[in-house]
Image: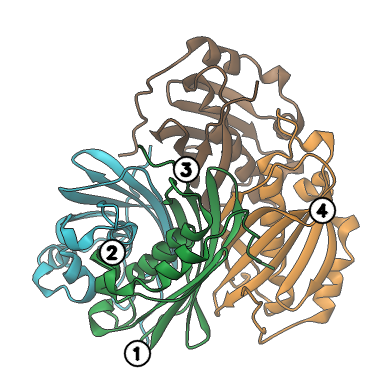
Chain colours: A green, B orange, C brown, D cyan
Amino acid sequence: MTTPITPKHYSAETAAAIAGSDDALTGLPAYLGIRTVEVGPARMVAELDVRPELLNPFGSAHGGVVASLVDHVLGSVLYPVIERGQWAATTEFKLNLVTAVRSGVLRAEAIIVAMSRRTAVVHVEVTNDGKLACIAQGTVLIPELRA
Amino acid sequence: MTTPITPKHYSAETAAAIAGSDDALTGLPAYLGIRTVEVGPARMVAELDVRPELLNPFGSAHGGVVASLVDHVLGSVLYPVIERGQWAATTEFKLNLVTAVRSGVLRAEAIIVAMSRRTAVVHVEVTNDGKLACIAQGTVLIPELRA
Amino acid sequence: MTTPITPKHYSAETAAAIAGSDDALTGLPAYLGIRTVEVGPARMVAELDVRPELLNPFGSAHGGVVASLVDHVLGSVLYPVIERGQWAATTEFKLNLVTAVRSGVLRAEAIIVAMSRRTAVVHVEVTNDGKLACIAQGTVLIPELRA
Amino acid sequence: MTTPITPKHYSAETAAAIAGSDDALTGLPAYLGIRTVEVGPARMVAELDVRPELLNPFGSAHGGVVASLVDHVLGSVLYPVIERGQWAATTEFKLNLVTAVRSGVLRAEAIIVAMSRRTAVVHVEVTNDGKLACIAQGTVLIPELRA
């Protein structure tokens, strides 16, 4: 169940570039401290440490932190499998938060489960110490870059 | 990825009763012709034939048919793992329709991915001839039956 | 809050054609007995009677019936506002079922809340006797018909 | 369409306390710079400034920032309407990102559209300069605090 597609196109160079560019992360991903663990065909793993600054008032990882990690891998998993001149724009996602996470690492695994010329559907699971914390699915649009 | 929970409680009798009660289906499930294929701990498979009466104006299985099959397994998968005196009420779900299905069988597999005392999260995949047609996830509430 | 867009294109003829074609409904919409109540710019209302055949085993309207009505208006609301040569394909939706409905009429109102050249986002509310039964939102793709 | 419920219970003191406690925000809400604009019965408005640190690599507000703001109001809107001894736990939400936002203010308005003893459904719209940027809906569980 839930297996990644076999993509028509796959750039190992792009995958390696994503995996090696954590130091270049800016904005929210940099603040959250997202680390790329693995990038492959139609699959990507990233993680972050649950620091005090990422908690909600109840002492658990803020739902927005989990959602940000989901959003990050949802779009990034597309880059090695889209063509040059295309980009990936997350247009919607839905997540179920199933466990409060107080410490340790949040690890998100994204797989592309369906892909057409203009859209892809991505399934994401977030775990903490092997235990499911969040399950998500979303749609990514694949527009052409304007010249 | 996406493995079912190991339920604390499991009634093989309830599972067998569900699997053997297709003739007793009424309402929409009866009209759609839903057949139970398999019921196990935290897992259920059901299917239906794509008949002309279930199509949309474009000649594909109506999204509502797919959603009905999703809703059916989303709730039913809970019965063997809840306690006597409880019932299962689907409170929300989300689905991505990834392929138009014109004929053959729609097969839905539901697994419970998280469960607490009062709620469960269920992941569903619908396939047609082995090809993914729909991916869904939803929440089921587990209220106590009133005496 | 939640106001419909002002569409760039609107065909009152297409709207009238949809409103007047209930007798031509086939497949699932015909079985469910969907009636078009109103079609306007970026807005559509449809309803159905809650008959015994549409119930779940608990005596309430089956979630799949509600989802089918949602799916019906989610796509149909697009036709008066898309160009000739385009069609509307629901690609995903999410719904919250907030009240069990035992009898009477299910009335769904759909409004387009965002629209680009290739996609639209639609918000749907389903009521029963004025009381909210379901709230939903989804994405419709707007592909070109092949010649 | 989409009107807030009339809550059975409403504490104007709690509402005022939330509205006046922005300086006490910690963790992600503090980093994002969330400001409470208005808290009322079954309704809440909050906003944040789109700063460079909150952008994605394309120069738009990161989807995770929008999701975090959604998650913040989704839960917070509950506090004035729940009883003492209860808390609010967002269990799931879904959002559609409809416009890229490059600067200015993200303003989120949340309304409770349904509420039972143990759950609430909340609808959220995020705007930027009056233009819809995101529409979301989610479920909040209302557990009892343990003694």
Question: Is C55 in front, or is C16?
Answer: C16
The reply, left or right, for residue D92 in relation to residue A64 is right
Quickly name the residue at label 4: B129
In the displayed structure, B24 sits above or below B57; it is: below
Mark 2 residue type: His
* Residue drawn at the location 75% of the way across and 35% of the way down: B55
Mark 3 → mark 2, Cα distance in angstroms? 27 Å
Residue to which mark 3 is pinned: C131
Quarter of the image with the C terminus of chain C is top right
Q: Chain of mark 4?
A: B
Give the CA separation, mark 1 to mark 2: 25 Å
CB under 8 Å between discs 3 and 2: no
Furthest residue toward top: C13
Q: How far across and down, in percent of the image, does residue A133 sit? A: 47, 77
Q: In what element is the residue under mark 1?
A: loop
According to the picture, the residue beneath numbered tag 1 turns out to be D147
